[in-house]
Every structure is written in C-alpha cells, then in structure tokens.
Image (cartoon, rainbow, N blue to C red):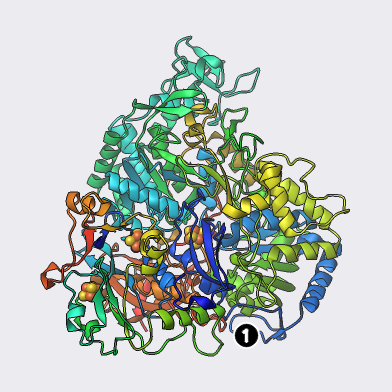
C-alpha cells in the first residue's frame, strides 16, 4: 500500500496562488475555505528583509491530532494514509478544527454565495453549492483529501497539476525510488512544526 | 466525476480552447457538466501554457457566470454625463440598439468617417489586432487607442525591443542563462507576456542554480525570488544600466568584439560634422573600416560581413580615426564608449540610491559570467552549427519603462546585452514574441523572418502595429485626432487628447474634423489611463455618442456610455487568431510553434452577443461588409505571415457572407492546409508544428545588424522639430524637448526626481500583483478573495521606519497627494520590503462604480495621481510617466 505525501519546493514556488485557486475550483469550496492556501511572511529588516510565500494544506499526518480529538470516529485514515472525514458520522463539534495544529480544517455551517446578496445564484454557484453539500457537507468538518476524486480519474491533485513552477510533487513516501523520496533525501526536505509530533507527510524544500 | 449523485449528470466533457482572461493566450481545457462550465485547466497540447495556467484563468467560471454581467443592451436616459452622474440605464432591444448605432454611424460615415474613435482593451489583444483593425480600415478611420495599454505598459519597451530584437519584449534564455539581471520586471514571476510559461522557465532556472539580480524599489515577487535584491529609486533604471555599461566598457574593458563588429552598427564610420554615417558615394551605404585591406568598405561588403558564426571576415575597426574622402571619421562604438564615461558609479549612485560599490560589483559579475568567446553547437535544419554562448541577460518591462525617460531607459538596459553579445543567442536575452519563424513547412506560413534594410539594420516582416519599429516613420502633418502622424515613434499618446484645449489644438494643427463617435471594446478608460476627472472631462465628454461592448457596467459606461452592448466573454466566442501576430504570444526557447483557437464552450447566455459578430452586422448594415472582409484579408497577410490563397480569402466583392465560425475555418485552412480546418483543430484546440533552433537563437543566422549608435534618430529629431515649428510656431500646444532624438543613450529625470518642494518627500509607483493584472479581475470574487490573502495587494505599502517617523501605523487611513493637488485615499500596510522613500500600490484598484459590487471600494486608485501632460511624457516615445512624487498624511 502506498503512503501518499507531497513535496513543496520553496525555491521553485513564486507565490502565485494558482494552487489555492485550483483547489478552490476543483473542490468547489465556499468563501473563506482554503484547503490549499498560500501564506505570506516577511522576515528581517531592510535591505536584508525577505518576503516568503508558504503554500500550505493538510499534512495528512501519520499521527493526526485531529483524529485523536474526534469523539465519533468520523475522522479516519485511509489505507494509503489520507486523513478523511466521514460526513455522516461527523457531529460538527469542531474539536478537530481546534485540534489541528496546522489550521487545515474548515467547518461551514451555512453555504454562502461569493456575490453580495440580491441576485439569484448563477448556474455555476448552483452547481458549486450542490457539489459542496453533497460531497463535503454543511455543519461538518471538511478538509483536503489529496483530491481523492481526481486521483480516481488518474489525475494529480489539483494544486499539483496547477503549479506552473513545478514546485509541488505528489507521490509515495514508502517508495524509495519515487521522486518525492528522492527530493526529500537529497534536497534537505523538512516538515512544518515537527515539534507538535503529528508526523506530517507534506515536506518542504528550502527556499535556496 | 466527483459528484456523489452521479445519476444527475447527463454530460461531462472537456473542451479545448484558449484563455482570454489576459493577453497571454494560454491553451486551456474547460469542463462542462450538464451544460454548466465548472472547471478550467491548462491544455498540455498547447505550446502556450503547456498544461499550466494562472490564478486568473482558473477563476474564470466566476467571470462567465457573474450575476453582475451585462446581459441585455442598455441605453442611457440621463443626457448628463460625468463621474458620479447616475446614467439611468434602461434595457432596450438589440434592434433598437443596432438601429440607433447604425443611424449615428451612417451620419458620421457621410460627414467624415474619421470622427469614429476606437478604444479597446489590451486584454483582448487578439480581437484588437484582427477585427478592430479590420473595421477601422473598412470604415475609414485612423483613430484608436488601447487605453492604458501602450502608454502604461509598452510604448517604450515594444518600440526598443522591436528595433533591437524584432520582438515585443525581451527575456533571459532561462534554460541557459546564469545571471539574469531583472530591472523591476515581473516576467517569469506571474505577470507580463507569456506569464505562465515564463514562470515555469524561471523556476527551472532557479532550480538549476542561476543567480538573478533584481533591481526594484520594492521586494516584489521577482525581487523576493532573486539571489540578490537591489533596492533602487523608481524611474532610475536607465541610469543604473548606463552605469553598468560604463563599468564594463571603461573600467573593466569588457565587450564582445565579434558581436559588435559583425552584428551591430558599432563599426559604422561616423562623420564628426553632423554625427551621421559616412556613406559610400556610389551606393549611399554606410561604411566600416576594413583593417586587413586598410580601406573603407560598405557595411555589407562580403569581405566584412559574417552572417553565421563560423564564417570568416576581415577584421574591422571599432576604434580609431580614419580618412574617408578627406573626412576624418570614427566608429560609432568608440563614440558610445566615450559617451558613457560620465556615468561613473558615484554619479549613478546619487541618482539611483544604489551604492557605487554595488554598481562596480555587479558590473564585475556580468564580466565574470558572460564567457565572451565561448560557443555551443546547436542542431539546425542545415546540420550542427556553432553559435556564441553568453549566459547573462538584462531584461525589463513596464516598471522601468513607465517614465519620462522611457525609450532611452529601455535601450540602456538592453545595451548591457548588446555590449557583451548576449542577444538572441544561447543563454542571453531573447526576443519574447520575436517575429522570427519560418512557418509550417508544407504551406510556408506563417512566415516571419527579419531582414536588413539598405543600411543593414534589422527589419521585421510582421508587427503588431501598422508601423514597424524600424525605420522610423517620417513625421507628417497630422490627420489623426491625437496628431499621431507627426510623431515618428509612438503608437498613440495621451498628452494631446487629454489637453484641456484639445479642440483648439486640432484647429492649430489643421485637423478638419472633430471626434464624433467612440466605440469602446472592453476598456474602462476612466480608470486605466490617469486621473479620472481629466480623462472624462477633457477627452471622453468630447464625443457626441459612445457605445460600448462590455462585460460589466464599469466606471466608463457609468460616466459616458450612451449604449452598452452585452458582449460575450472568451468562453462564449470564436477567435480566429489568438496570437497577435502569430509568433507573439509564444514562449521563448525550444518548443513547438502553435496556433491556438478560441471556440465557445457554451452558447452565449441571455442576450449576450459576440463583439466580432456584432461588428460584422454593423458593417453589413453600413454597406461595408465586403470592405471589412478585404481589410481582414489584408490584416492576415501583414500580421499572420503571408499572402492568403484566393480559395480561402473572405469574399471581397459583396457576393457572399461568412459566419464568424467560417472566418476561423478559412484562416486555419489557409495557414495550414485544407485538412487542418476548424473541424480538425477543434479537438486539440491547437495546431502545432516544429520550431527550428535557428528561429530561437537567430542572431547568427540572420544577415542584419542592430544599432548601438542611433544615427537615424538625428534625422527624426530634426524633422519633428521642423514640423512643429511650421505648425505650431509659438509652441502653444507642443513644447516637448525633441533634443532627446540623438544617437546615444542618456538618462534624464522625471518630475519625480526634480520636485523641489520638500513636503512631497515620497516616491509613488504601482506594481503588478499576480491576482490583479492585465485583465478585468477585480469583480471576480475568487480573485478578490485570493488578493486579500496578500496584505500588500489592497494596502498602500510603506516602509515601517518611514511610517514611524510620520506617526503612521499599520492600517491607518491616509491621503496620498501629488504636487498637482490630486489625491487618493487608502490604507497603509507596513513592510520592510520597500525602499524607505517609496510607496507601492498594487495595480489600479479602488473601483467606485455601482455595478461592480465585488470590486467596489477595495484598494487605492493610483491612476488618479497620474498626470497626462507634457511634463509627464517621454518626448522620444510619448510614453506616459507613471511614477510621481507625493506627500502622505493621515485622514
Ligand atoms: S502554484 Fe506553485 S508556485 Fe504558485 S503558489 Fe502554489 S506552489 Fe507556489
Ligand atoms: S494537518 Fe491537521 S487536519 Fe491535516 S491530518 Fe494533520 S492534524 Fe489532521
Ligand atoms: S496568463 Fe492570461 S491567458 Fe494565461 S491562464 Fe492566466 S489569464 Fe489566462
């Protein structure tokens, strides 16, 4: 069985937001929901300051805190290591939203249009609303699932496919010959906040 | 299919077409599920994009279905016009709209068709270069402008890159360049032409270990990804570049002898009396000094020319004084070398705020990396060929060219490349969208191979505008409403049409007609050009009737449009030729050529109608349809590389009508053969053919040279001075400094650099945010939300220390005011990533229109600070100055 993970090369990434947008469109996420997100930070002082983009998503942790705190067993891990939510079991307590050290979970109580109120929903938003309600659900916890449906169609996760910098690589961490295993080994791969101990499976390569 | 309830889905298809969210023209695949467009992805078959697209293209379903789109023709019922006036639009039928429009157009046609002014958006560049140009020719008006485009983005850059590279822009050969020098240019970092693929190439280049140095007043995407960010004062890139040229030539003694001798006019002999070429008495050709035969030779004498690298030629002089027909002449290169001596690192440092030691060091880095003398072998149609390898490249675009010193700044930056032979060869600066391509072999189209003129200088076959970049037009008494014909270099200008005394000016310059009808295609010129009040009052309100093809009711329609026609967006229409001309939208480097088509993914909704189809209908009703077809045939020949065969020409005698779909089909069959019509290309969305390596690295395969001494500018300067003297002897209306038409580059200051009032202590400029660039993005709620993820997009970026000195805090509401008293409001975002005396604004934000609620009230409207008068105009290119000196204070 594969153990899926991702590598994000911060040297290649130029902070273009295509990954976040592709995720939004592929998963029809409503306003405020970013299963994939690009954070920005500034460090140091002029003229030696650094502006850095940091794309983030659920780390599909080996030891997920979100799963530990889930009282109903709605959060579970698939055989290939993807952390998912069973929306029918989820009671919407949002312990996992608080429990995730990476802020990767989103609970949406009411579906909102992207447009100010007043006009009827567009055919596209009717579609996204229905899609969201059926697949992810309202009043329950939602999160990135490494684009499980796209992968079932033989495609890469949307954020990976969209990245024009080829900064994102998806693959099997257990396969020593996979591109991501190679990159992590040879290019000083690291994870975010290793100290919280959830054993993330999204790795980063240093900016330079 | 991802919907859990799959039984509801009757249809699920992906359609290949071309993105139109901006002018990059990426190939896309669009998913349609049960009649609704739901997803957009890159099309891996299309050489433009190669399967990748940007954040804007991905977000386009929200554009297609935006409930605030214009869906029906609208008519203004309030005769009053202006900013803040309620237009009182009411819905009308297409019939009424067309009747009104055609009646007005007919009257204008009879009176003087030149009264029609076409205004268009750069976003739909493909429509402009084909349909718009065709209509203007057929109707008989020369008046148009691409509001904001050109004067904000490329009047200087396209002009200079055209002269030096037959290209729209320049870009490092990312695949092999080791030292890209980026002068504040977002190419490769999410904006600009070929945005997506340049980003891929730039990322590959970083991964390979190239060391980019970026000069930029702020830590932009390109600066934050660079190996080194050099904070520089806005508008001084030209001085920086001349400083580097000086360090190379005069401190380090580094230049590429072979390149300068055989690929530039550097060895052309210049006579001291008037700075002109010394010409051969018999042939009138410029001459070089043959050091082997020790005599003058005409520039293209076979003994002194080297087309391909491995050819041999006599050595020619770059230095010294030579007697030709009794006149003591010197090579132009030597004059250049002496000329740049004044740009010492210390002098340049004062102008740019960059330490002199940094300038020296970077000059040394260029010298250390350029590998003059190194070669590589490339595989060409004629077998393996040796060409120079020069892995450094200086490039630039809007940021460095949007100034009063636009033209010479562009040229000065590119001079770095030409001094060391790093132009259109392996590893160097390549023309982006260069008009160089031998075409699809079986048909030989589209064919665009440049060639030398009589003086040996580079000329192009196909170009975006009616006038090619070289040779310069001869200034003529004007016929256009912006007096365009008088000016040898520009595409259009603002200082004439924005003049409060525009009509008096037209009188003075003997223009016998006045503006009558404006046709607007997709532009929001109230916001895209400069101060909104000036644009509206001085220019737009001078038209008697304005009709507009538009997606939204923008500030433009609100202020001045009489009729709005609901246009289709790019997902609802055909476009016959998306690349403008055929090579322009292509990435550089070794990939195939492609001709991407745009086809509708869904039928136009509501009463939206395709601009192209409506224009055809207008032509028909005006009785000029056959002329329109003829004009389109002519445009195809000029812009899309080669004559049309009779079989596929659009009917010119009035006996036949074509659907727009048929126009696409004929274009494809004519360019690529009868078997490659629309039905064939539809499936993949693109027709591709191999690119020759000698079309990528064309420098040492082409017999032309490029100027390093701009001898012909002297003539142009004299001609324009003379013409102005004749037509406006008292300089009542035109008082630009034509002395900048001279053979050698200089940096001269913008008003920003000479402001005396100490109150105005900050430099303000705007930059291109990847979510809000080259398009009408701000009403798209996906892009709006994404923009809020980056605090510097909607905020006014200010250095923390400067802000503290002024008692300004993060999030403060402030006024920013220019010396002319124009002011704008916005919120401050503090940052360390900006030169402390600067304020940075992302894009042109701050919509106030009632009908774009997502865009309304977000960010600051920088353009309101932009003055469009003579002091803010580059005399050389008529480019607009878009930096300004300002003061900032709390609300
Ligand atoms: S798409 Fe790629 S380059 Fe763009 S922000 Fe995401 S990871 Fe970075
Ligand atoms: S990142 Fe958060 S949501 Fe994702 S698996 Fe880890 S703990 Fe759970
Ligand atoms: S770069 Fe332009 S053409 Fe390409 S995907 Fe983005 S918006 Fe579309």
Give neighbour class at mark 1: few <14, some 14-19, many 20+ (Cα, 10 Å). Answer: few
* Residue B550 placement, left or right of A121: right
* Residue sitting nearer the eye, B887 or B379: B379
Quarter location, residue B173: top left
**Looking at the picture, does residue B393 appear above or below residue B110?**
above
Q: Quadrant of the C terminus of chain B?
A: bottom left
The x, y position of residue A196, in whole percent, is: 12, 73
In the picture provided, is A70 more to the left or to the right than B191? left
Q: Is residue B454 above or below residue B833?
A: above
Camera sees residue B805: no
- Nearest the viewer among B284 and A127 is A127
- Whole-percent x, y for residue B541 in the image: 67, 74
Comparing B11 with B225, the one in front is B11
**Is residue B353 in sight in this rendering?**
yes
The verdict on label 1 being within 8 Å of ligand 3 is no
Left or right of B383 on screen, residue B356: left
Q: Secondary structure at mark 1?
A: loop
Q: Nearer the viewer, residue B857 or B159?
A: B857
Percent from the top left, x then y, of residue B49? 47, 53
Say which chain tag 1 marks. Answer: B
Q: On the image, which quarter does residue B560 sit in?
A: bottom right
B169 to the left or right of B569: left
Coordinates of residue A17 in the picture (x, y in percent): 37, 66
Image height of B782 relative to A112, above or below:
above
Q: How many marks?
A: 1
The residue carrying mark 1 is B85
Picture layout, residue B150 above or below residue B385: below
Q: Quadrant of residue B246?
A: top left
Q: Give me the residue at 21% from left, 79% from top.
A: A66
């Amino acid at each position: 069985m594969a153990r899926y993970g991702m590598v994000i090369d911060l040297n290649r990434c130029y902070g273009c937001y295509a990954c976040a947008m592709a995720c939004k469109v592929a998963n029809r996420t409503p306003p405020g929901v970013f299963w994939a997100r690009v954070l920005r930070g500034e460090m140091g002082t002029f003229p030696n300051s650094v502006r850095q983009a940091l794309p983030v998503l659920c780390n599909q942790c080996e030891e997920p805190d979100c799963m530990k705190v889930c009282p109903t067993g709605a959060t579970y891990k698939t055989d290939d290591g993807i952390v998912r939510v069973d929306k029918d079991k989820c009671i919407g307590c949002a312990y996992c939203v608080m429990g995730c050290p990476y802020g990767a979970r989103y609970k949406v109580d009411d579906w909102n249009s992207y447009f100010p109120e007043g006009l009827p929903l567009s055919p596209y938003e009717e579609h996204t609303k229905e899609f969201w309600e059926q697949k992810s659900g309202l009043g329950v916890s939602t999160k990135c699932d490494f684009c499980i449906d796209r992968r079932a169609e033989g495609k890469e996760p949307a954020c990976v496919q969209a990245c024009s910098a080829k900064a994102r690589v998806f693959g099997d961490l257990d396969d020593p010959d996979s591109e991501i295993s190679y990159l992590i080994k040879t290019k000083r791969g690291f994870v975010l906040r290793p100290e919280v101990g959830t054993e993330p499976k999204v790795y980063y390569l240093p900016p330079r | 299919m991802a919907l859990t309830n799959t039984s509801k889905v009757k249809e699920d298809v992906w359609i290949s077409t071309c993105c139109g969210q901006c002018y990059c023209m990426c190939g896309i695949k669009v998913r349609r599920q049960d009649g609704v467009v739901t997803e957009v992805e890159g099309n891996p078959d299309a050489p433009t994009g190669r399967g990748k697209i940007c954040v804007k293209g991905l977000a386009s379903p929200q554009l297609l279905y935006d409930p605030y789109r214009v869906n029906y023709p609208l008519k203004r019922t309030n005769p009053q016009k202006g900013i803040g006036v309620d237009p009182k639009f009411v819905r009308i039928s297409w019939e009424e709209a067309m009747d009104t429009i055609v009646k007005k157009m007919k009257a204008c046609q009879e009176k003087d068709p030149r009264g029609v002014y076409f205004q268009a958006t750069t976003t739909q560049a493909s429509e402009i270069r084909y349909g718009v140009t065709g209509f203007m020719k057929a109707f008989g008006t020369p008046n148009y402008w691409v509001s904001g485009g050109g004067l904000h983005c490329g009047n200087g850059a396209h002009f200079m890159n055209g002269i030096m590279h037959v290209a729209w822009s320049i870009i490092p050969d990312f695949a092999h360049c080791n030292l890209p020098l980026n002068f504040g240019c977002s190419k490769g970092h999410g904006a600009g032409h070929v945005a997506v693929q340049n980003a891929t190439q730039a990322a590959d280049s970083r991964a390979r270990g190239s060391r980019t140095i970026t000069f930029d007043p702020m830590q932009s995407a390109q600066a934050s990804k660079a190996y080194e960010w050099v904070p520089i004062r806005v508008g001084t890139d030209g001085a920086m570049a001349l400083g580097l040229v000086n360090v190379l030539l005069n401190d380090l003694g580094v230049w590429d002898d072979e390149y300068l001798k055989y690929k530039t006019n550097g060895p052309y002999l210049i006579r001291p009396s008037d700075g002109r070429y010394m010409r051969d008495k018999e042939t009138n050709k410029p001459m070089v000094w043959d050091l082997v035969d020790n005599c003058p030779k005409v520039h293209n004498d076979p003994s002194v020319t080297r087309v391909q690298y491995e050819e041999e030629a006599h050595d020619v002089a770059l230095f010294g004084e030579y007697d030709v027909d009794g006149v003591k002449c010197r090579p132009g290169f030597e004059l250049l070398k002496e000329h740049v001596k004044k740009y010492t690192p210390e002098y340049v440092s004062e102008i740019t705020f960059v330490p002199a030691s940094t300038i020296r060091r970077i000059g040394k880095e260029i010298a250390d990396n350029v590998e003059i003398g190194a070669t590589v072998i490339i595989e060409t149609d004629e077998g393996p060929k040796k060409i120079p390898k020069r892995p450094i490249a200086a490039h630039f675009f809007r940021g460095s060219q949007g100034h009063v010193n636009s033209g010479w700044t562009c040229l000065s930056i590119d001079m770095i490349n030409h001094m060391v032979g790093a132009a259109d060869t392996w590893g160097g600066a390549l023309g982006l969208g260069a008009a160089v391509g031998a075409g699809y072999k079986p048909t030989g189209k589209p064919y665009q191979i440049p060639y030398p003129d009589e003086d040996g200088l580079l000329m192009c076959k196909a170009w975006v505008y009616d006038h090619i970049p070289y040779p310069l037009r001869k200034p003529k008494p004007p016929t256009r409403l912006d007096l365009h014909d008088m000016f040898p270099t520009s595409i259009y200008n603002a200082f004439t049409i924005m003049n409060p005394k525009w009509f008096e000016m037209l009188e003075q310059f003997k223009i016998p007609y006045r503006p009558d009808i404006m046709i607007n295609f997709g532009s929001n010129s109230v916001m895209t050009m400069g101060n909104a009040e000036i644009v509206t009052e001085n220019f737009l309100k001078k038209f008697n009737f304005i009709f507009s093809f538009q997606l939204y009711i923008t500030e433009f329609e609100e202020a001045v449009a009489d009729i709005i026609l609901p246009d289709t967006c790019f997902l609802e229409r055909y476009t016959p030729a998306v690349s403008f001309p055929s090579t322009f939208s292509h990435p550089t480097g070794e990939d195939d050529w492609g001709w991407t088509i745009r086809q509708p993914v869904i039928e136009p909704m509501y009463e939206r109608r395709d601009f192209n189809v409506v224009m055809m209908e207008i032509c028909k009703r005006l009785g000029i349809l056959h002329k329109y077809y003829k004009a389109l045939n002519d445009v195809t020949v000029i812009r899309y590389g080669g004559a049309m065969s009779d079989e596929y020409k659009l009917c010119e005698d009035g006996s036949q009508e074509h659907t727009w779909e048929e126009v696409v089909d004929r274009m494809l069959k004519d360019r690529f053969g009868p078997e490659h019509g629309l039905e064939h290309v539809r499936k993949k969305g693109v027709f591709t053919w191999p690119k020759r390596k000698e079309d990528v690295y064309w420098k040492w395969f082409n017999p032309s040279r490029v100027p390093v001494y701009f001898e012909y500018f002297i003539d142009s300067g004299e001609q324009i001075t003379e013409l102005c003297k004749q037509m406006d002897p008292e300089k009542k209306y035109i008082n630009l400094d034509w002395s900048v038409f001279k053979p050698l580059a200089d940096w001269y200051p913008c008003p920003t650099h000479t402001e005396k009032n100490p109150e105005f202590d900050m430099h303000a400029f705007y930059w291109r945010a990847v979510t809000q660039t080259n398009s009408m993005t701000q009403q798209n709620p996906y892009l709006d939300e994404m923009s809020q993820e980056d605090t510097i997009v909607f905020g006014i970026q200010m250095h923390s220390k400067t802000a503290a000195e002024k008692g300004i805090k993060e999030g403060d509401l402030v006024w920013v005011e220019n010396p002319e008293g124009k002011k704008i409001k916005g919120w401050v975002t503090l940052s360390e990533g900006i030169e402390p005396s600067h304020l940075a604004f992302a894009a042109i934000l701050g919509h106030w229109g009632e009908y774009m609620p997502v865009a309304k009230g977000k960010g600051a409207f920088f353009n309101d600070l932009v003055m469009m008068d003579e002091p803010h105009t580059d005399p050389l290119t008529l480019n607009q100055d878009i930096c300004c000196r300002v003061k900032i204070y709390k609300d």
